[in-house]
Image: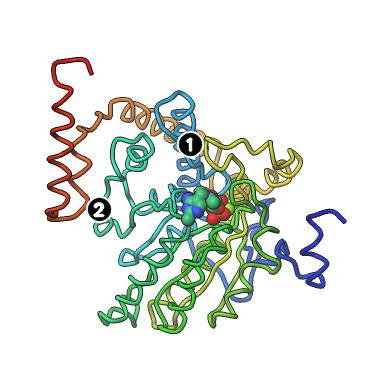
Amino acid sequence: MAKGNVARTRNGGSTAADPEFVQLLTPEGERVNHPDYTVDFTDEEYRSLYHDLVVVRRLDAESTALQRQGELGIWASLLGQEAAQVGSGRALRTQDMAFPTYREHGVLYCRGIDPIMPLGLFRGVDQGGWDPNEFKFNMYTIVIGAQALHATGYAMGINMDGKVGGDDGEAVIAYFGDGATSQGDVNESYVWASVMNAPIVFFCQNNQYAISEPLERQTRVPLFKRASGFGFPGIRVDGNDVLASYAVTRTALDNARHGNGPTFIEAYTYRMGAHTTSDDPTRYRIASEVEAWQAKDPIKRMRLFLEKQGLADEAFFASVDEEAKAEAIKLRERVLSMPDPQPLQMFDHVYPNGSPLLDEQRAEFARYMESFAGGAH
Ligand SMILES: Cc1ncc(C[n+]2csc(CCOP(=O)(O)OP(=O)(O)O)c2C)c(N)n1
Ligand SMILES: [Mg+2]
């Protein structure tokens, strides 16, 4: 038996790859109805969703190119996951707090953060320069699954502060991947969120791989079905459908803010590029699989939808491309002119008000640096 069939046979047909999900927009750009979810966008909002999808993909491509040219240390591309990120990112209300991984550049963009910010981190000149409280978007987290705990603690805090209930209640969203669902941190978060009725949405982008490990090595049941064992609803959405991603996330966040507790969302999508620029996916997956997912491209279907509905013409699509290109050029120029940090700067933002131990370490490091002054060692 082929290795990949093991999970299928043991679950009587319900497999981790079972594609039953909420969909509002087919790969052909047809708008379909769902009994529980819908969207009510104006024509302008439909166009702006398309705009965001194109811009975040273009900025991402530019960042990959910058890494290839030695200007970034590494880059984790969002290619293929634009709809999951823009849909969920735009579903957040101003007061909601997001906890990202290292790949949520599309959500970051939707939160209104300058897209240069993550590039400083990946260039190694800062530690991620945005203020999480200002933008309600926490720092990127490289440690797989750790942010699920941070997010759950934050959500429990919101409850304690009495900020849940009503339309202006606050909610939290924690982003992570399919691989992260195997981490203890994430499962512990589910337990706490459930029993404390925390106002949180667990948004899992199932992009089918954890680096080279395919989904079938993480789970024998669909990820969204696990949530019921922890005591809250799980739902799978077509993660390449920006409308469905928006609708499902908005409903889950609104449930959370009204005091109805957590939801787990599995956004079923595909990582069309490499895990990071350090990875070579041709070593572990075949071209036909990638091609099959290219037919489900999130941007292509939104463009087809706009065309079919008569909401946009060639001039609109050309102007979005032009704008995305101009933003990418600007991004490139700004990356190239980023100053290198002073070595002692790394001590500055560890604690808001410093600490005696840190002061000692800074002084020691300063003496070490000075020992190089004016001579060869
Ligand atoms: C605690 C921990 N273990 C291992 C790693 C190494 N690592 C980096 S990314 C990754 C895979 C994550 O896969 P997934 O959760 O599916 O997210 P994706 O990268 O696919 O978005 C691993 C194992 C890490 N960063 N942190
Ligand atoms: Mg993954």
Furthest residue to the right? 1
Please say if the residues under marks 2 and 1 sit with CB atoms less than 8 Å apart: no
Query: Does ligand 1 reach within 8 Å of label 2's beta carbon?
Result: no
Quarter in which the C terminus is drawn: top left
Q: Place residue 181 in its image quadrant.
A: bottom right
* Image depth: mark 2 or mark 1 in front: 2
Visible residue check, residue 83: no
In the image, which disc is placed on residue 131?
2
What kind of residue is marked 1?
Arg
Quarter in which the N terminus is drawn: bottom right
Give the crowd class for mark 1: few <14, some 14-19, many >=20 residues within 10 Å. many
Q: How many marks?
A: 2
Helix, strand or loop at label 2? It is loop
Residue 287's place in the image compared with 245, above or below, is above
Residue 304: x and y, percent? 63, 47
- Residue that numbered label 1 is attached to: 58
Q: Earlier in the sequence, mark 2 or mark 1?
A: 1
